[in-house]
Amino acid sequence: MAEQARGEAFSGNGYGTRRRMLYESARDQIERSIQSGFYGEAIALCESILADRLESRLSFLRNKNRGFQTLGTLVCALRSVEKGDATQPLRDTIEAIDVWRKLRNRALHQMVKVADNGPIADWQNKPTDWKVRTDFLQRIASLGYELAQHLYLRVAELNPQHHDRVLPTPRRAIDVVRADLASLKGEADDEF
């Protein structure tokens, strides 16, 4: 499949308005999905927002339309070009996104897999595997939404032409989100 170029705002083609409208719909759907227990859907929408904002930042820094890319590719590329004290909050957010990306993959791709790691503990007195795994997905979805809010804000702050604020302002500092991700990683290592 050929790489698609990103529609760039301020080009006179209506891409900025169209993107804002899609972000408004995505925001509302993420919130509904998390509230309704559709965590996989929320995670997919968060990933789309994260990738779009990273693509935007990378295109700006390299002064070249980077097209659509995966989170892993974007994180690696931005690590090599994002420099300076003013961008430390953005770099912290990018590192958190990389941790989230790996946890998301693990959570989604291992929902029904059982590892060969010895005898199964007495599961009758514990929450079911499904409950443990869906609770994990819920936390991944919620943290993904927080990361989307952080990234959206950071990229907007560094772009003098970005005026809209479609996603809510993050309620928690990025360091708190990163600590939650580290804790979740430890739990994942124990559970999966």
Image (cartoon, rainbow, N blue to C red):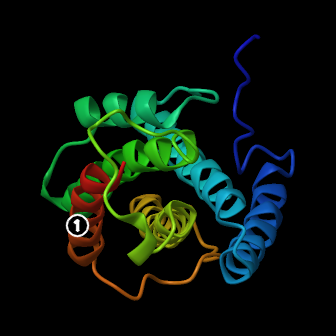
**Looking at the image, which is closer to me, 44 or 62?**
44
User: For this view, does 88 lie left or right of residue 1?
Assistant: left
Q: Is residue 16 visible?
A: yes
Q: Is residue 126 visible?
A: no
- Total labels: the figure holds 1
Q: Tell me the quarter of the image containing the N terminus.
A: top right
**Quarter occupied by residue 168:** bottom right
Q: Residue at x 37, y 48 (%)?
A: 192
**Looking at the image, which is closer to me, 66 or 191?**
191
**Looking at the image, which is closer to me, 76 or 117?**
117
- Neighbor class of circle 1 (other Cα within 10 Å; few <14, some 14-19, many 20+) is few
- Tell me residue 106's x, y (percent): 44, 43
Q: Is residue 181 above or below residue 91?
A: below
Please give the residue where the numbered disc 1 appears in the rendered image. 183
- Tell me residue 38's x, y (percent): 72, 68
**Looking at the image, which is closer to me, 69 or 179?**
179
User: For this view, does 49 lie left or right of residue 171?
Assistant: right
User: For this view, does 132 lie left or right of residue 82?
Assistant: right
- Tell me residue 77's x, y (percent): 35, 28
Query: As drawn, which residue projects farthest toward the left?
Result: 85
Q: Residue at x 24, y 64 (%)?
A: 89
Residue type at mark 1 is Ser
Q: Secondary structure at mark 1?
A: helix
Query: As drawn, which residue projects farthest toward the top?
Result: 1
**Quarter occupied by residue 88:** bottom left
Q: Residue at x 75, y 56 (%)?
A: 16
